[in-house]
Amino acid sequence: MRIKEGYMLRQIADSWIVVPIGQRVVELNAIMTLSETGAFLWQRLEKDISIEGLLQQLLLDYEVDEVIARSDIEEFIESIRQYGIIE
Amino acid sequence: MRHDREMDCISKYKIAEDLIEIRTQSRYIADRMNPFLVSTQDRPDMIAKVYSRQKLNIPDGKVIMDEYITWTKQRFPWNGYSIFTKNRTNERILSLMNVDSEWTKSKIHYSEGEKDDLGLDVAEYLSFHFIGIMFRNNIINNNGLVVHASAIKYRNKGVIFSAPSGTGKSTHAKLWEDYSGGSATVLNDDSPAIKLISGVPYVFGTPWSGSSDKFINAASPIAAIVILEQADINSIMPLSIQQSMLRLMPRCLLPYYNREMMHVALNFLDRIIKEVPVYILKCRPDYHSVEKVMEYVYK
């Protein structure tokens, strides 16, 4: 799975935000913000990757329990799936 | 009919320190831009040539936006955008702008004598609006940004009031004019420009002010950006940097169509938010709400 085309992740004013690019937008109604971990996962999801792949990367970079990491990943995927930005 | 270019009026205008050259025979555009007229030999930041045409053809290209105004991406023989508006029955093009991807040169054509239901020259108005679209993108490459807001100048300080449409930006700006007995003036009631001048954030009036036509050619250092929210009781509170960004970014006219320009614009916005205090004003449409802002900004 991966993030669909047409989104840009960037850090601004101490936050990670997701901006739609090349879509039919003049003014935004809402901004999607990500946590530090969310931004980490997003960056990996810009290329095709599995949940297992994400888990390995997260465990490599963060001091975190495997069970917690897995549930964080699943929760993150579920939340961005609701916005329809993952394929 | 061949257009007689000898008759063109070539004028230069300075808006938010951006130098704009316009060639046109349109009286409407010349009148609207007139407060910003300058006499200079300097090289313009952008050039717009505006001509009337009897017939306009719908351009090819990939459609990237289509809400009242249609944008298409052009790649060959020139790289840029075609932006146009059709009449209500979608039969004819009222106005069409072909602009390069750097937003420095455009040709704008408008359909001759095309009037709306009120008998106004809608095609000429649209051409003027297209120059505004060009300006707000051109300024991004010149250290600036246009924001959807109402901006006032009072005691040499600029205050920008921003909020989603219909919240009461114009109403609040008008309250400042009345409360101050006219010493507060509206710089622009819809889309003022923000620019860094020698590192200092300034707000500038521009001639594009939506339907209100309320604007002046003046500027002021920005003392505060105030996000408005309707409420039953007036209160004002400073916002954190993160909250400022979340509230202000949706109100900025950003280049969502282009990743590179988006980065430039967001870098600029990041800097503005870190330098200018941003407040949230929960307010009623009364003088007391004006006093609340004054307490913070003019203490």
Image (cartoon, rainbow, N blue to C red):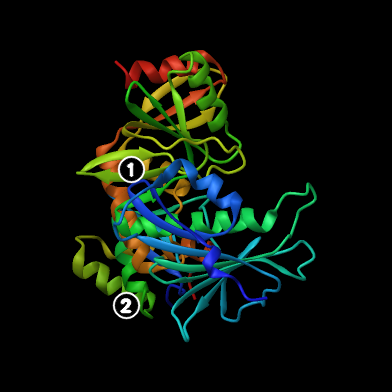
Farthest-out residue, front: B6
Please tell me in which quadrant of the rendered image residue B219 appears. top left
Residue drawn at x 61%, y 78% as measured from the top left: B59
Q: In the drawing, does residue B151 fall left or right of residue B125?
A: left
- Residue B159's image quarter? top left
Q: Secondary structure at mark 1?
A: helix
The residue carrying mark 1 is B242
Q: Amino acid at mark 1?
A: Gln
Residue at image position (77%, 71%) is B91
- In the rendered image, residue B196, in percent from the top left (x then y), is placed at 27, 45
Q: How many marks?
A: 2
B259 lies left or right of B74:
left
Occupied quadrant, residue A77: bottom left
Q: Where is residue A24 shown, x and y percent of the image?
A: 56, 64
Helix, strand or loop at label 2? It is helix
Using the rendered image of the protein, determine whether residue B114 is visible from the camera's viewpoint: yes
- B6 vs A61, left or right, is right
Mark 2: amino acid: Gly
In this view, the mark in front (1 or 2): 1
Report x, y in % for residue B210.
58, 44
Q: Position of residue B240 (x, y in %)?
A: 32, 36
Query: Which residue is nearer to you in this view: A23 or B51?
Result: B51
Q: Residues within 10 Å of mark 1 (few under 14, many from 20)?
A: some
> Could you say which is closer to the camera, residue A11 or residue A76?
A11
Q: Quadrant of the N terminus of chain B?
A: bottom right
- Asked if badge 1 and badge 2 are on a common chain, one would say no
The chain to which mark 1 is attached is: B
Location of mark 2 (residue): A53
